[in-house]
Image: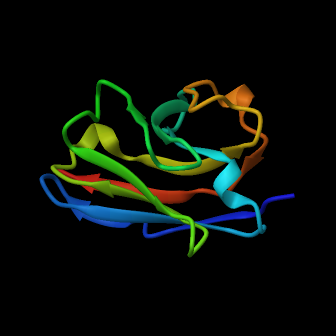
Amino acid sequence: QVQLVESGGGLVQAGGSLRLSCAASGRTFDSYAVGWFRQAPGKERDFVAAITGSADSTLYADSVKGRFSISRDNTENAVYLQMNSLKPEDAAVYYCAAGSKITNWSLFPYEYDYWGQGTQVTVSS
């Protein structure tokens, strides 16, 4: 069982930066792939970025490539999403998710077993 808690969301102007954190419980966190997803009002939950358990590989959605960076610190049981050059279209509730049966990483929500409660990101133009 893994529990995930996101933090770091807030209001930022376009062009600004935020760093989201995902704190995880569990002693085998490094065996879980972790993904970040986002959901804007009235829209589906979209993939943002993912990282392998060992942090040796990452995957990004085209819309955030070059602006966002995912990382993890398994000694702290934490995963981070550094978001730079934010745009109004990045506004959404951001969720982190963990999956133990994922090979490397996944962009499909259904492959993740555990989800956090989400953190709101608002970007003003």
Q: Is residue 96 left or right of residue 112?
A: left
Q: Is residue 87 left or right of residue 75?
A: left
* Residue 100 screen position, x and y as percent: 76, 42
Quadrant housing the N terminus: bottom right
Q: Residue furthest bottom?
A: 76
| Residue at image coords 22%, 61% | 17
The figure's colour scheme reads rainbow
| Residue at image coords 64%, 56% | 30
Q: Relative to 119, say whether 96 is above or below.
A: above
Query: Which of the 4 image quarters holds residue 20?
Result: bottom left
Q: Is residue 69 left or right of residue 24?
A: left
| Residue at image coords 25%, 63% | 12
Q: Toward the viewer: 75 or 92?
A: 75
Q: Residue furthest right?
A: 1
* Residue 38 screen position, x and y as percent: 50, 41
Query: Which of the 4 image quarters holds residue 65?
Result: top left
* Residue 37 screen position, x and y as percent: 52, 40
Q: Residue furthest left?
A: 15
Query: Which of the 4 image quarters holds residue 5?
Result: bottom right
Q: Relative to 22, say whether 123 is above or below.
A: above
| Residue at image coords 72%, 36% | 112
Q: Relative to 54, say whether 89 is above or below.
A: above
Q: Is residue 26 left or right of residue 54?
A: right
* Residue 47 screen position, x and y as percent: 50, 31
Q: Toward the viewer: 38 or 60?
A: 60
Number of numbered callouts drawn: 0
